[in-house]
Image: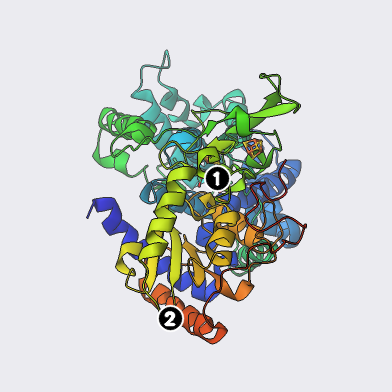
Amino acid sequence: MSPKAILRAPLERIESVFDAAFTPALNPLYQLGALGWFFYWIVAVSGIYLYMFFDTGVEQAYASIERITHVQWYAGGVMRSLHRYASDALVVVVMLHLLREYLLDRMRGARWLAWFTGVPLLWLLFAAGVSGYWVVWDELAQYVAVATTEWLDALPLFGEPIARNFLHPSALSSRFFTLLVFIHIFVPLAMLFVMWIHIQRLSRPRVNPPRLLALGTLAMLLALSVARPAVSHPPADLARVPGAIDLDWFFLFPLPLHDHYSGYVLWAAVGALTLLALALPWLPPMRRTPAAVVDLENCNGCGRCVADCPFDAVTLRPRTDGAAFSEEAVVDSDACVSCGLCVGACPSATPFRRRSRLSPGIDLPEIPIATLRERVLDTAGKIREPVRILVFGCRHGVRLDRVAETGTGVMVLPCVAHLPPSFIDFLITRARVDGVLLTGCRDGDCHHRQGIGWMEQRVGGRRDPYLRSRVPRERVAWTWLGVDGEARLRKRIESFRETLRAAGPCRRTPAGTKDEVGRPLGSDAPAGGR
Ligand code: HEM
Ligand code: SF4
Ligand code: SF4
């Protein structure tokens, strides 16, 4: 087992506990990026409020923050505490978000941009937090200012050491102090810009947590702000060394390291870590699968693949082959992660077509639809009576080979939504199996972002291409479990088998039967297609 897989096991267990406590839809571990945005906005709004009452000068800064904290404790004081605690919460969710994306290997392919921009985001986040401690100009600010400038002076960036500004009271000019305040405003703005780039390669990025989760976390931050308001240390005095200091460990944990290691060693260490982090998306074990390919002969430009791609890797452009359709699909192979959601969405990806014509508008070279049809038929054919179940899953869920047995066949796909719903129709209406069970990642945390959501909507008839109504719904089931759900999957298979047993054996729909739009069953034409 790889070290990543070993570390993933406790993560999976914690996620299961959170699923039970919060429900998958409200599990904060699946909403870390969205919570990051939410905390950012709280910090921004509370920061704007504080700035309205803040005086920028060296002499005035401390007194103005004292007024905000104590005179207007009911508004300014709460805002100050919210500003502090939402910033700390932002550090927590961002660190967990980073750890999770790393352990789940969600940084390859199209995700490289999100990962790559995440690294400078970390820098900006810490720069914003540390500069926030300067502007209060209390003893903590004095300690932070001296420690950070001494650290910065180890770099050959400045003509003369900037730590000199803090040698004695007369050395600190109001201009320098105004620069610090400017940094504390500018860095969060730069951060917002990088956060925007961060999500550019993702379609429908989740930047808002579910309302209940947002309200719950806001209520917790407010309660903490009232119960334990953020207050200042005694005012800074450059003539004295600060006394005992209460550090904010979320932001300031690197500063005490400076007491033990030289600035050069620390810069070398963070520089090396940053470079390593930036390179991670391209380091082994990197698995690059060929991107989806479009076959213009079978593409009518309907745009379903564009709507369903989770990484905005497919677009429509004006037709180039003179066919009677106005547009055609085109894949950006750099952005494609070969998840197959587009294939599952394409109306021409149907097993009802004759084998010679089984080339859909868009397909995965690694496992083309024609090969998938052969494998499905082969696996279904090997399942022995009495109740035949075919389970479709993905590489990111339960290891399906462990649940295969005489009455249960298994098929592993890049993502469960790679399976066009017409395959389920084909299997059941032709009585190849008695039931189809779909499984995959955990509910709320699909590895391919939208795979399980799209699949549920297609089977539920809410998204094209939908599973036709002629397929008895008791013969189709799904359960979203993640890698540690083997025992639950076994139970689900057994309960599904009971349902199927009660429904009786699946019968082949008689020849000549029409579907709901009047076409004979087994028609070559794709559902809702051209
Ligand atoms: C202020 C800090 C950050 C915020 C607000 C933030 C926010 C987000 C959001 C909203 C998403 C989209 C989630 C989705 O829709 O599935 C996302 C995705 C992502 N983030 Fe961050 N992020 C931050 C920092 C980081 C850092 C430090 C890293 C790692 C170095 C990182 C790595 C990623 C990756 C790899 C994805 C793609 C995830 C996927 O496709 O499943 N992020 N982030
Ligand atoms: S879903 Fe299929 S037919 Fe529609 S645009 Fe995409 S490739 Fe073409
Ligand atoms: S396989 Fe299709 S859906 Fe998946 S990333 Fe590539 S183009 Fe998008």
Q: Residue at x 51, y 39 (%)?
A: 356
Q: How crowded is mark 2: few (under 14 residues within 10 Å), some or many (20 or more)?
A: few
The residue that disc 2 covers is: 494
**Can you give x and y, in whole percent of width and height, for residue 358 in the image?**
53, 41
Q: In this view, does 366 lie above or below 326?
A: below
Mark 1 and mark 2 residues within 8 Å of each other at the beta carbon = no
Query: What amino acid is at disc 1?
Result: Arg
Q: Is residue 310 above or below residue 5?
A: above
Q: Residue at x 38, y 71 (%)?
A: 408
Which quarter of the image is occupied by the N terminus? bottom left
Quadrant of the rendered structure where residue 530 is?
top right
Q: Earlier in the sequence, mark 1 or mark 2?
A: 1
The residue that disc 1 covers is: 354
SS for dot 2:
helix
SS for dot 1:
loop
Q: What distance separates the C-alpha of mark 1 from that of mark 2? A: 35 Å
**Can you give x and y, in whole percent of width and height, for residue 244 in the image?**
40, 54
Q: Residue at x 70, y 57 (%)?
A: 520
Q: In this view, does 173 lie above or below 436?
A: above
Q: Does the residue labelled 2 lie within 8 Å of ligand 1?
A: no
Q: Is residue 410 visible?
A: no
